[in-house]
Image (spheres, grey):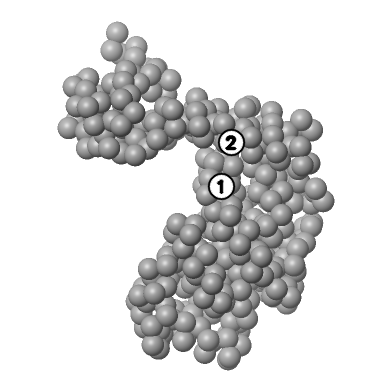
Amino acid sequence: MQYREFGKTGVKVSRLGFGAMRLPKDEQQAIMVLIRALELGVNYIDTAPGYMDGDSEKFVGKALKGYRERVVLSTKNPIEDASGDNWLRRLEKSLKRLDVDYIDFYHMWSISWQVYQEKIARKHGPLWAAQKALAQGLIKHLSFSFHDRPENMIKIIDTGNFETVLCQYNLLDRANEKAMAYAKAKGLGVAIMGPVGGGRLAAASQEIASLIPSGVKSTPEAALRFVLSNPNVDLALSGMGSIQMVEENVEVASREIPLTAQERASIIAMTEANQKLRALYCTGCKYCMPCPRGVNIPRNFELMNYHRVWGLTDYAKEQYQALSPIQKAEHCIGCRRCEKKCPQKLSIASKLKEVVQALDPSEVCKAR
């Protein structure tokens, strides 16, 4: 296992972190998976009070017995209101569920710049409560997880109140790249969630796998190696639900060099070219909506792009089937009202037929 200094916190973390959102529902199995990760050198475990209806924190707490001093523990506090007292009560509940005396990295959970201004930084609000918890040793480091626009991540960093950031970053979504570099330059630790795109990159893609000449066993391996090859990334969280997943990911995170400079450059060039190709098909502006028939036009085209641009065909088909019947492309009757509103003047009705042919050919057969 490779390790990195986590910003300026003085803490060394494993490049692979355990995201405890998708643990097995059986308690003993969950504990076994967690302990196997610890045995193989993973020392950072990230959970949250809402994961698995609270069971995640409980399972993590039980797995920590006998390992607490060698584990870097992370959990989160949802900013439900501007009350510091309520924030402290939620902290106390997490400490109880985890059955620990302190939390190493405690996150303001999924915050935006607006939430920071309106709730967190208020008098006797969550920030005041966090400073109190730091002074009492209930938490060791204050962090934030983030789903806002990249420029707002920089604003939150510039408050100087946080030591690490947890944000989205993967092959399909590189929007936070510059903000991550800024965080690193300011001395914050940078942790990544969604390195396999929330499951999108768990599907097989020969197009993505072929970008690494040295070879990969799977698309998730290529995705994880890409994330870890970014010099501004300290660790990547992976939601691991089995011992096999743990062992496979540990093998990847044990590489001293995740990707060569040439391999990384090749992948970046491909992603940028594919983004341009995607925009030619549909930019996702949503001006075409609403469809009078209820078809979710942007989502259909988004899934088509996973198929035609990224080679994630199995994922695209699975997600297409998950749409409600009226949202599917096959529900289009060709009225073409959407085409009058499309800034790119796309032949939307024709392209929706292509979606059906590619993602649900059985419907084409029915139509015939």
- 301 vs 192: above or below: above
On the picture, is 252 further left or further right than 91? right
Tell me which numbered mark, 1 or 2, is placed earlier along the sequence.
Answer: 1
Q: In what quadrant of the picture does the N terminus appear?
A: bottom right
Residue 215 figure quarter = top right
Other residues around mark 1 within 10 Å, as few (<14) / some (14–19) / many (≥20): some
**Residue drawn 57% across and 39% down?**
201
Q: Residue furthest right?
A: 256
How crowded pointer 2 is (Cα within 10 Å; few <14, some 14-19, many 20+) is rated as some
Please name the residue that numbered disc 2 is placed on.
271
Give me the residue at 71% from left, 54% from top: 231
Spot occupied by residue 161 in the image (x, y as percentages of width and height):
54, 78
Instruction: Give the amino acid type for the residue marked by disc 2 in the picture.
Output: Thr
> Could you say which is closer to the camera, residue 147 or residue 51?
147
Residue kind at label 1, given as amino acid type: Arg
- Check contact, mark 1 vs mark 2: CB within 8 A: yes
Q: Secondary structure at mark 1?
A: loop
The disc placed on residue 174 is 1
- Of 99 and 211, which appears nearest the observer? 211
Counting from the top left corner in percent of width and height, residue 259 is at 76, 43
Q: Where in the figure is residue 285, as x and y percent of width and height?
A: 34, 39
Q: Is residue 336 above or below residue 224?
A: above
